[in-house]
Amino acid sequence: MRRTFPPRRSVHRPGNRRRPVALLAAFVLALAGMLGLIGTIGSASAATDYTQSVSEPSSTQAKLTFTPTSPASYVIVHYTVGSGGQLNVQMAASGSSWTYTVSPISAGTVLAYSFTYTKNGPQYDTPQFTYTQGSGGTSSAGTSTGTSTGTSTGTSTGTSTGTSTGTSSGSTGGSTTPPAGNCTGQSDTPDFGSNVHIFDPSMGNAAIQAQLDAQFNQMKDTNSAQFSENRVADLYKPGTYNVEDNVGFYTSVAGLGQNPDDVTINGDVTVDAFNASDAGNATQNFWRSAENLAINPSSGTDRWAVAQAAPFRRIDVHGGLALYPASYGWASGGYVADTKVSGQAASVSQQQWYTRDSQLGSWAGGVWNMVFSGVNGAPGTSFPNPPETTLSTTPVSRDVPYLYIDGSGKYRVFLPSLRTNASGPSWASGSTPGSSLPMSQFYVVKAGDTAATINSALAAGCNLFVTPGVYHLSQTLNVSRADTVVLGIGYPTFVPDNGVNAMQVADVDGVRLKGLLFDAGTTNSQSLLTVGATGSSANHAADPTTIQDVFFRIGGERAGKATNSLIVNSNNTIIDHIWAWRADHGTAGTVGWNTNTADTGLTVNGNNVLATGLFVEHYQKYEVVWNGQGGKTIFFQNENPYDPPDQASWKNPAGQNGYAAYKVGTGVTTHEAWGLGSYCYFNANPSVNNYHAFEVPNTSGVRFHSVLTVSLGGVGTITHVINDTGAVTASNTTPTNVVSYP
């Protein structure tokens, strides 16, 4: 989005396989963490099959070396230092040996350790050994017993004995829990770098306003800032501020209280059609956010006139909320969650909008596609006239992780609890339920960090706090530990170079990804983000992975290429507000049918995956492919690619014209979706046609509600809405609606 076309006052447009060894190793780490020192089961090996030793590279380091007599696919060391808790680490291969250095460890401290390793396929556990730092090193040979299973009971033998029992649950492919204390020596009052501005009421309103204004002047212009590499986060410590915060491109505004009303803005947090070149059009107001504060609007109504990738979360608006520009010009959809608006929320010229788990005084407006789930004060379902679709609750949701300052002045990250059948804000009855982590459990990613330093932190058991910046990746970022948090502020951007995939998440419980922008590099990547390995089958219902405010871009700043943007293989994943965008405009040389190439925005292979707030646009084949059973989507917004050069270049494998924007796999028997719109604007060749926008199996278990198509300005056509149902799009930019299917 978005090109412009002649205005119309009545409507407004914008624009089951074996797991890989690495995952099996990660599962062992998770199991070890639950069982303590692993017991053994099975019959003993007939001969010595490993040697192990400890050496001292320095007075504060103990180097563990494990050498199996036959090659091992992986070796994991389980160790305690003195009276500390157990840590579980995958060792590094060094020739035929495996090594790991424990540091720091002081003289006289007892190190207790054991190993888990593979031997000709099966997996074995050693007895526990002990070593006292400063004794000059030791070595021994041994045998081991058993293979690791979901439940393990046994007694270890050797220098020490012990019994452990336990059951692994939730997922396979897990990894160790984060070590207690500092995973990297990170302070709980960290340096977040120069792109994070932290405001305190003691600074004075005038000084804060001057900084806000200078920053906004740099970030506001649609022509110069939209594809710049400026990134910034404005964070307000608890207190009251009398300021006007205008929010430009790649800017995150957030309060640092534990709850929204801990930070109050007497004034406005505003997005509008700020620039003369916008001509009142808010359809390119992308990549900006506001979160976790209260607003007393200066005129009684706050204005948040945005397009895609601009979430408004955890905000208490003491008044009204205008979601349209002051000019009443075109606006192009957005997302509100976990928010309270005491007055009226008005969409007016927004073509579509999704609101989740919130409370509104009232709602006004609707052009084509307004969707609500779990919203107190939302209008009832009346699609298509007016075009509003409402679910009384959201089936499953978990609000975003966020940074806050505790009572002692230390920074922590709060992790909201999972909600089922939710309605209203998570903080409506007080503090949001959940838990928190100290910053010592995070690695702060900032200028100078590389894929190697980030992966090293992940391998050490750290979570990631990613500060504003653009980070080029020479290797894939591997998130393999269960419950890892990757939290970005200020639109930190990952750019994969040389065709690498940007990020891979293992099939584990509870990973939380929030606030990231993946921007394709100029050499094609197969996928920008993949969650779970192919064939993942674990049940994560009790602790799902969440993907929230995560955005994907192909082209625009650079001539990016990526076959897939997001692939979800893990079951029970929650996709909560993504925008996957193959650019239809950008800097010169970055956009074109053969330039910024991309097949598919989202592929879902996992079962029981839920998407709440799904925006996918302009991909060149099926834009969403949903192969998993039991999927649900609440709100979908799509534009077909603008630029197919001719019909022969854009036909699906069945020989039909074009590609469906949302395709449910032929083997799927259960799937349900509410509030979906797909629009065409074939400006490269207006004679191009798409046979249908939605392609689904004809079975009673696959159900769609409130579905529409539109031809923007009559530029090209879509023949049917869903399968062979629904009339051809009209030429006057009015929707073709299907209330329910089948």
Image (cartoon, helix red, strand yellow):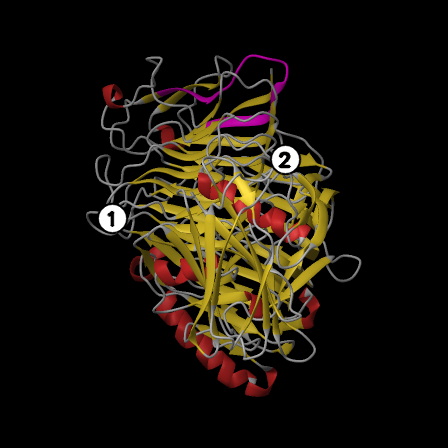
Residue 626 image position (x, y, % from top left)? 50, 27
Q: Disc 2 to disc 1, how far (Cα)?
A: 35 Å
Q: Is residue 707 magenta?
A: yes
Residue ID at (69%, 60%): 435
Q: Relative to the observer, which residue lies in front, 482 or 644? A: 482
Residue ID at (62%, 55%): 158
Q: Amino acid at mark 2?
A: Asn
Q: Amino acid at mark 1?
A: Asn
Outermost residue, front direction? 47
Between circles 2 and 1, the one closer to the viewer is: 2
Residue 240 image position (x, y, % from top left)? 65, 78
Residue ID at (35%, 45%): 501
Q: How many marks?
A: 2
Query: How would you classify the magenta stretch by its main secondary structure?
Result: strand
Magenta segment: 690-709
Question: Do tag 2 and tag 1 residues touch (Cβ < 8 Å)?
Answer: no
Q: Which mark is residue 498?
A: 1
Q: Secondary structure at mark 2?
A: loop
Residue 251 visible here: yes
Residue 372 image position (x, y, % from top left)? 65, 40
> Label 1: few (<14), some or many (≥20) within 10 Å?
some
Outermost residue, left direction? 589
Q: Quadrant of the N terminus?
A: top left
Q: Which residue is mark 2?
A: 539
Residue ID at (37%, 28%): 714
